[in-house]
Amino acid sequence: MNFIKIITKAIAFIVLVIIIVSNFNSVVKTSKNRVYNYEEIELLRSESATLDKIKKLENQQIYDSIDDFPYDSMGFADDNTFRIIKNVYGNINFYGEFNKGNIELYDYYKEKFIQLLNCTVKFKHIERGEEYYLNEYGCFKPYNNETFNLREYNYCFFDVNNDGAPELCIQEGSSSYIFKYIPQTDDFVLWYELFPSNYQLNGTRKVRWEGLGSGLSGVFYELDAEGHEECTVYFFSKRIYNSKTDESYEVAMVSLPKYAAFNQEDIMLELANQAYFSKGNGTYYFRVTEEQFNALTKDYYEAAKLSRENIKEVTFTYDELFGDF
């Protein structure tokens, strides 16, 4: 009986040795006390990266909106963070041109847009999935027995989306509505809506918003050919009163530019502990010095100043643009 036990143990030992030798090439030693195979190592690497990412993102300061930021206790972005933000801003071209496109198409497109203005055809609102006559929509809808007067508005006529053909922008007060004609289907669409107010065209496929009141504030949008926002930049300065010190001072904030085709998460892993995130517009903000704020926004304000002049070349009254039709 003892002989049989000895033989059994010997066979089990031999089998164990064979298993270890046969798997020797698929293992790698990562510490003195533990041996992992390649699959285990990749899993550990993934788990480590995830834990590291969670640890970094846990440091984020998240608020419902910019109104909830702790302005009286905010820290400044450090030099490395500012360098990264400045490099991203350096890739943005705030300057815009009011491209005229193919001028030979102008008369044809004017004849088409006259139909839209005269409410003999409808335009499509893509997001709503609805169609409207112009005098059925928004500020164009007459109230209290008012008449729909086309001469009350100003009109911009140029290649807004950079496709070579002109679009029609109707300006009503501080709001604007950009319409595109599609000759292939004989359709009109509301390409972009600058509403409710203070939105301005910065040029072909570029829009800005200028804040009112105390402090500087602005938003810049770069659009794609369909009028979707490809890049968005926010910034503002806010005067803060500290009741503890009885002092007032400016707090300058800039956003990390948002790109529709770019995931901010990777870059934010490096900057998370210095960012203030607004859930209201899904944007990361950083506090910077006044000098840094001016450096980042200098081109925005210069481009805005130029656009206010350049847009005059493509802005018309109704009679100036359509008087011959």
Image (cartoon, rainbow, N blue to C red):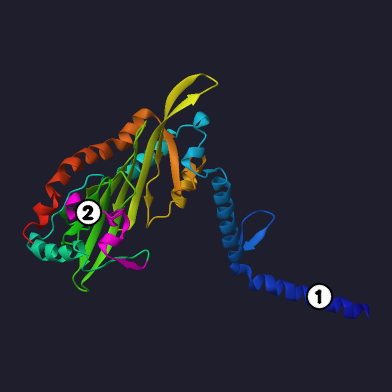
x and y percentages locating residue 131 in the rendered image: 31, 68
Residues drawn in magenta:
129-155
Q: Name the quadrant containing residue 225.
A: bottom left
What residue lies at 19% left-to-right and 57% top-to-bottom? 168
What residue lies at 20% left-to-right and 43% top-to-bottom? 307
* Three-letter residue code for mark 2: Ile
Quarter holding the N terminus?
Answer: bottom right
* Three-letter residue code for mark 1: Ala
**Dot 1 surroundings within 10 Å: few (below 14), some, or many (20 or more)?**
few
Residue 224 seen in this snapshot:
no
Q: Name, please, the residue furthest toward the front.
A: 145
Considering depth in this image, is 311 or 18 the residue closer to the camera?
Answer: 311
Which residue position holds label 2? 170
Check residue 131 for magenta coloring. Answer: yes
Tell me which numbered mark, 1 or 2, is placed earlier along the sequence.
1
**Dot 2 surroundings within 10 Å: few (below 14), some, or many (20 or more)?**
many
Which residue position holds label 1? 10
Residue 192 seen in this snapshot:
yes
Position of 253 with respect to 73 (left or right) is left
Q: Secondary structure at mark 1?
A: helix
